[in-house]
């Protein structure tokens, strides 16, 4: 009889642990999904803001080393999202890496990199805030034939979803 009680208690404990573990996993996965959604929102906001610099773009390089909290899983989701929605090839390279890979041709006589025609490079520059409920950062977009622009992006999380607070151009060269 005591053996049956112990087995029953152990089954209840194991079942409870599975339920709690499953809930923890789902919450952790939701946080990961929300982080990927944050950067999808940032990309969409930028893309809508700067239609002139994005004309004719065939690839976009997002230097993810310059963005906070972006995991390998977030990158996969973000890149798949951009490829599907915008029909672009997505790279994860810095300016130096793009040049080494042949996307950017050495400078012309005037010193400018003119052969960056088919792509843009997006980098994060400075985070003003980064928390689970609010993110604000400055970034830049490089497309040498049209120049560079700086942008400000800010989002807040309400009802467990990221929402755009503001996105605007801060400078242009």
Image: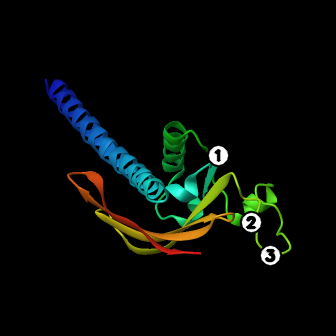
Q: Is residue 170 above or below residue 156?
A: below
Is residue 154 in view? no
Residue in the picture at 58% in, 51% down: 55
- Find the distance from the CA under tag 2 to the CA under tag 1: 19 Å
**Which quadrant holds residue 131?**
bottom left
Left or right position of 146 against 30: right
Q: Please state which of the two labelled residues, at mark 2 or mark 1, is closer to the viewer.
A: 1
Say how many tags the image has: 3
Q: Are marks 3 and 2 in contact (CB under 8 Å)?
A: no
Q: Say what secondary structure mark 3 lies in.
A: loop
- Quarter holding the C terminus is bottom right
Image position, residue 75 (x, y; %): 53, 49
Residue tagged 1: 58
Residue tagged 3: 111
- Mark 1, Cα crowd under 10 Å, few <14 / some 14-19 / many 20+, is some
Q: Earlier in the sequence, mark 1 or mark 3?
A: 1
Left or right position of 13 against 152: left
């Amino acid at each position: 009889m005591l053996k049956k009680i112990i087995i029953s208690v152990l089954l209840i404990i194991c079942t409870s642990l599975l339920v709690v573990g499953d809930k923890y996993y789902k919450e952790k996965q939701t946080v990961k999904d929300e982080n990927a959604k944050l950067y999808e929102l940032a990309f969409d906001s930028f893309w809508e803001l700067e239609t002139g610099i994005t004309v004719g773009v065939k690839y976009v390089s997002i230097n993810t080393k310059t963005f906070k909290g972006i995991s390998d899983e977030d990158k996969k989701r973000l890149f798949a999202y951009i490829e599907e929605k915008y029909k672009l090839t997505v790279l994860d390279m810095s300016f130096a890496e793009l040049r080494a890979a042949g996307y950017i041709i050495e400078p012309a006589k005037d010193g400018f990199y003119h052969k960056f025609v088919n792509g843009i490079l997006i980098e994060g520059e400075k985070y003003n805030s980064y928390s689970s409920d609010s993110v604000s950062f400055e970034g830049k977009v490089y497309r040498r034939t049209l120049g560079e622009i700086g942008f400000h992006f800010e989002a807040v999380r309400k009802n467990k979803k990221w929402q755009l607070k503001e996105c605007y151009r801060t400078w242009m060269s």
